[in-house]
Image: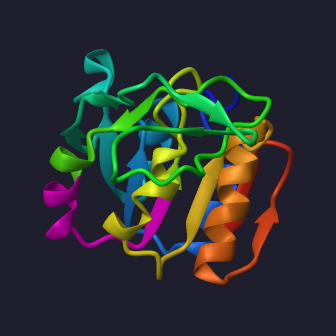
Amino acid sequence: MNKFGGWAIQESCYNLIKEILPEGKTILEMGSGHGTDALSKHYNMISVENEKPWVGKYNSTYIEVPIRKYTNGGIKTQGLFVDEDPYLPPDLPGEGAPRQSGWYDYKILGPKLESLSYDLILVDGPNGAIGRGGFLKHLDLFNTKVPIIFDDINRKAELQMMVKVSEILNKPCKKLDKHTGYIL
């Protein structure tokens, strides 16, 4: 039996994916968990994961990528966190939220994503203690012509990130419920 909610995607998120994506298509997810198990019964899953206990746990093609820590630990500037790494402009979301301390190592992830084809992106990792603002910073690594679903938008940083991605892509973002948002 699959568990929804808590650390996993909400059942409403699962149902939204089932509604907008035909079975047999491919989902690229940032972070793996119980939702991976449920979704893998209907879709081909590609899971980017930094936590070894989750790698290989479910029916998914796993891409294990360590977290690349921001070199200065995330200095707060004008309500947002920045990094000394020149690849990261100073506008990571995070005001009033836990510090953005890192993201998947883009030097490892980027080349692995180049040859992949997928029909939907599910942003549900890394965990909130690390931060997900790197998805915004490295948006150029992804095919943004596909639907993008954001989990945990009840946290301010994730909501800010979804809104900023929406602005960059010039596509509207919508809230499904207090935990899930999307850009179609």
Residue 174 in sight:
yes
* Identity of the residue drawn at 42% across and 31% down: 102
Range shown magenta: 110-121
Horizontal and vertical percent position of residue 175: 82, 59
Judge whether residue 163 is colored magenta: no
Q: Is residue 41 above or below residue 8?
A: below
In the image, 42 versus 92, the foreground residue is 92
Horizontal and vertical percent position of residue 169: 59, 79
In the image, 64 versus 132, the foreground residue is 132
Judge whether residue 118 is colored magenta: yes
Q: Is residue 41 left or right of residue 58?
A: right
Q: Quadrant of residue 142?
A: bottom left
* Identity of the residue drawn at 61% across and 66% down: 165
In the image, 36 versus 130, the foreground residue is 130
Total tally of numbered discs in the picture:
0
Q: Is residue 152 left or right of residue 131?
A: right
* Identity of the residue drawn at 65% across and 31% down: 76
Specify the quadrant that holds the N terminus.
top right
